[in-house]
Image (cartoon, rainbow, N blue to C red):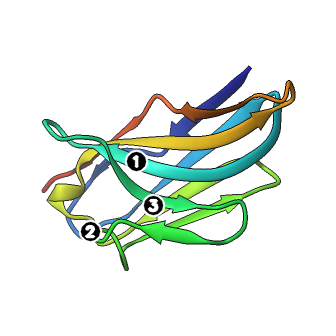
């Protein structure tokens, strides 16, 4: 089995920073793209940032210049460094990973989500 789990969410004031971490574990053969999504109350889940197995990244326009996605391939980790946080960044943030397992099955895995709240 494969699991994906986020950590690092919390409460922060506007303009502050948070760093999210996501760890993939289990019978992993290879991880392709990894990404962060978020879902605010009453809104659909949206892509925040994604990173390929190399170094290619892409970001939602709303977070460009403020958020940075990175990954540690050896540790099966992906990170989201968030800065200049705004009220509208408040959401549940989800980690997403495209993974080949050791039984030659490819699937997309989601974490359980971590709440990030920007409030004064």
Residue at horizontal 17 percent and vertical 57 percent from the top? 88
Vertical placement of 92 versus 65: above or below?
above
**Looking at the picture, how far across and down is residue 74, in whole percent?**
82, 54
Query: Residue farthest to the bottom?
Result: 65
Q: Quadrant for the C terminus, please.
A: bottom left
Of the numbered discs 2 and 1, the one sitting upstream in the chain is 1
- Find residue 70 and report its image quarter: bottom right
Q: CA distance from mark 3 to mark 1?
A: 7 Å
**Is 37 on the left-hand or right-hand side of 4?**
left
Q: Which residue is mark 2?
A: 62
Question: Do residues under tags 3 and 1 come within 8 Å of each other at their CB atoms?
Answer: no
Neighbour class for label 3 at 10 Å: few (<14), some, many (≥20)?
many
Label 2 residue SS: loop
Q: Which residue is mark 1?
A: 37
Label 3 residue SS: strand
Of the numbered discs 3 and 1, the one sitting upstream in the chain is 1
Q: Which residue is mark 3?
A: 49
**Is 117 on the left-hand or right-hand side of 17?**
left
Question: Do residues under tags 2 and 3 come within 8 Å of each other at their CB atoms?
Answer: no
Residue at horizontal 37 percent and vertical 79 percent from the top? 65
């Amino acid at each position: 089995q494969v699991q994906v789990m986020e950590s690092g969410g919390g409460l922060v004031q506007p303009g502050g920073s948070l760093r999210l971490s996501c760890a993939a574990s289990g019978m992993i053969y290879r991880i392709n793209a990894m990404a962060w999504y978020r879902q605010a109350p009453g809104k659909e889940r949206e892509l925040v940032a994604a990173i390929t197995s190399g170094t290619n990244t892409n970001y939602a326009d709303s977070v460009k210049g403020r958020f940075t996605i990175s990954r540690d391939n050896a540790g099966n980790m992906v990170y989201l460094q968030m800065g200049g946080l705004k009220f509208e960044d408040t959401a549940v943030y989800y980690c997403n990973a495209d993974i080949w397992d050791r039984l030659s099955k490819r699937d997309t895995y989601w974490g359980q989500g971590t709440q990030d709240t920007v409030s004064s």
